[in-house]
Image (tube, rainbow, N blue to C red):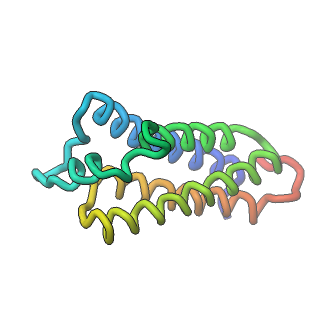
Amino acid sequence: MPSEGALRNAGAGLALLGTGIAAYIAIAEAGGGAPACVGGSTGCATVAASPYADVVGSVNVSELGVAGYLMLFGAALVRGDPGRFAGAALALIGLGYTIYLNYVEFFVIEAVCQWCVASAVTITALFAVSVARLVLYGGRDEAR
């Protein structure tokens, strides 16, 4: 069984990875372009140009991702039940929104952004780590 410290470190690392992915997408789109897809695919440009790329008119979905991943990073740094519960709750919200966005990407826009898929894999792993931390150590005194 992994120690809580190992789960916290894994959560922090995954949150930083997710922050990097979301920041790359945000920076690419802020410059009026789209993130570069590997292998010459145009899926990233198609997804970035869709009306689903922004919420509330002008907030890019990737900016929400940066904020969410940074909050998850913070939750990974917080010891005890407050960090455990915050991490699990934030990861659940992020995973739920990611599932919705992937549905839209695959079935409405009919294009796949490789960076969005990388973020989806990252938030899924982060959800698993956060729930494991909560289930294994929730309600206990600070574990190392």
**Left or right: 111, with 14 as reference point:** left
Count up the numbered dots: 0
- Residue at the spot 49% in from the left edge and 43% down from the top edge: 56
Which residue appears at 60% of the width and 40% of the height? 73
Outermost residue to the top = 31
With respect to residue 26, does 14 lie above or below?
A: below
Percent position of residue 138, x then y: 81, 59
Q: In the displayed image of the protein, which residue is found farthest to the bottom?
A: 107
The residue furthest left is 40
| Residue 74 located left or right of residue 81 | left
Residue 36, located in which quarter of the rendered image? Answer: top left
Name the spot of residue 86 as percent of width and height, x first.
73, 49
Seen from the viewer's position, the closer of residues 44 and 71 is 44
* Residue at the image point whose x is 74% and y is 59% from the top: 134
Q: Looking at the image, which is closer to me, 79 or 26?
A: 26
Classify residue 96 by image quadrant.
bottom right
Task: State the residue lying farthest toward the front.
Answer: 57
> Residue 40's spot in the image, x, y percent?
10, 51
Does residue 4 sit above or below 77 in this rendering?
below
Screen quadrant of the N terminus: bottom right
Tell me if residue 28 comes above or below residue 54 in the rendering. Answer: above
- Horizontally, residue 137 falls left or right of residue 45, namely right
List x then y, in percent, for residue 76: 66, 43
